[in-house]
Image (tube, rainbow, N blue to C red):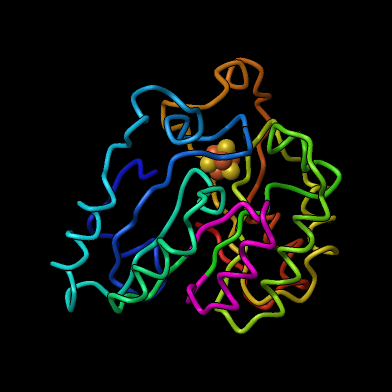
């Protein structure tokens, strides 16, 4: 199910002119999530905001004008038809960037094996010790570890990224992530911004006013990763 379309982005797909399509549904409940309408099922999404037919008609018209398509969510890998959906995009000649929370390493592997993805961006929600708090659900963390290993050992271009959230993270989470993810090519630290809508309103009430210094975190991680940026 598709929840929306951004017809043009110059920032979502590195070095590409792209469109971004949003899928509905996610199996995480990150309290700080800025896309609650894409996470929680609701009647207004029963038929989606965007039909696949309209989406592919749009892409047909953008052939030669866009380089690629970013597929984001929610969590795209929970869509039952994600493989056929990505294949249809690829068959139209577009590069595909897939955003994922890493919960489905088996699906990610299939997308890689079938050459359906050219770039993958995986959220690292926190250190392994703090993962369940950051994503709001309990599950087998081996899935996250498997996705990380799959991505870093693949020939698909990738980035790992973490939104740094005061009240969720403390500095030692990043020290631990540096050890866990040691040697990866590209890591982005994303500043948490209050965008006015959030999955768990109570989180805002409880949110501790801890100041996390992204530059300091970057310095703590830069010996572990080949490239690290703040954005
Ligand atoms: S921030 Fe968390 S809850 Fe929101 S879409 Fe991403 S993984 Fe799902």
The residue at 66%/56% (across/down) is 102
Q: Nearer the viewer, residue 20 or 12?
A: 20
Which residue is at a point 73% across and 40% down the rendered structure image?
169
Q: How many marks?
A: 0
Determine the residue located farthest toward the bottom in the rendered image.
Answer: 155
Q: Nearer the viewer, residue 1 or 23?
A: 1
Q: Observer-nearest residue: 187 or 128?
A: 128
Residue 183 is left or right of residue 17, and the answer is right
Q: Residue at x 68, y 24 (%)?
A: 208
* Image quadrant in which the N terminus is located: top left
Residue closest to the eye, 12 or 65: 65
| In this view, 32 is above or below 181 | above
Rendering coords of residue 207 (x, y %): 65, 23
Where residue 53 sits in the image (x, y, percent)?
A: 23, 53
| Position in image of residue 231 (x %, y %) | 49, 57
Residue 187's quadrant in the figure? bottom right
Residue under the image location 79 percent in, 49 percent down:
127
Q: Taking 205 as reference, is 34 above or below it? A: below
- Residue 139: x and y in percent read 79, 41
Magenta segment boundaries in residue numbering: 98-119
Q: Is residue 177 magenta?
A: no
* Residue most extreme to the left: 61
Quadrant observed for ligand 1 in the rendered image: top right
Q: Is residue 152 left or right of residue 51?
A: right
From the viewer's perspective, is residue 134 above or below residue 163? above
**Left or right relative to 109: residue 157:** left
């Amino acid at each position: 199910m598709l929840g929306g379309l951004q017809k043009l982005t110059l920032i979502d797909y590195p070095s590409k002119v792209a469109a971004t399509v949003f899928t509905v549904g996610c199996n995480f409940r990150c309290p700080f999530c800025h896309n609650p309408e894409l996470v929680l099922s609701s009647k207004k999404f029963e038929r989606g905001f965007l039909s696949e037919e309209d989406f592919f008609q749009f892409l047909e018209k953008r052939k030669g004008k866009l380089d690629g398509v970013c597929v984001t969510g929610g969590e795209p890998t929970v869509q039952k038809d994600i493989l056929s959906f990505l294949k249809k995009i690829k068959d139209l000649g577009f590069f595909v960037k897939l955003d994922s929370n890493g919960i489905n390493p088996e699906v990610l592997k299939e997308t890689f094996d079938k050459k359906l993805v050219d770039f993958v961006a995986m959220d690292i929600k926190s250190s392994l010790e703090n993962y369940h708090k950051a994503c709001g659900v309990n599950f087998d963390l081996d899935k996250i570890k498997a996705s990380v290993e799959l991505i870093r050992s693949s020939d698909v271009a990738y980035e790992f990224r973490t939104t740094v959230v005061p009240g969720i993270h403390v500095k030692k989470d990043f020290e631990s992530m540096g050890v866990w993810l040691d040697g990866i090519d590209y890591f982005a630290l994303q500043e948490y911004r209050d965008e006015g809508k959030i999955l768990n309103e109570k989180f805002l009430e409880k949110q501790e006013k801890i100041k996390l210094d992204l530059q300091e975190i970057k310095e703590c991680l830069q010996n572990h990763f080949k490239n690290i940026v703040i954005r």
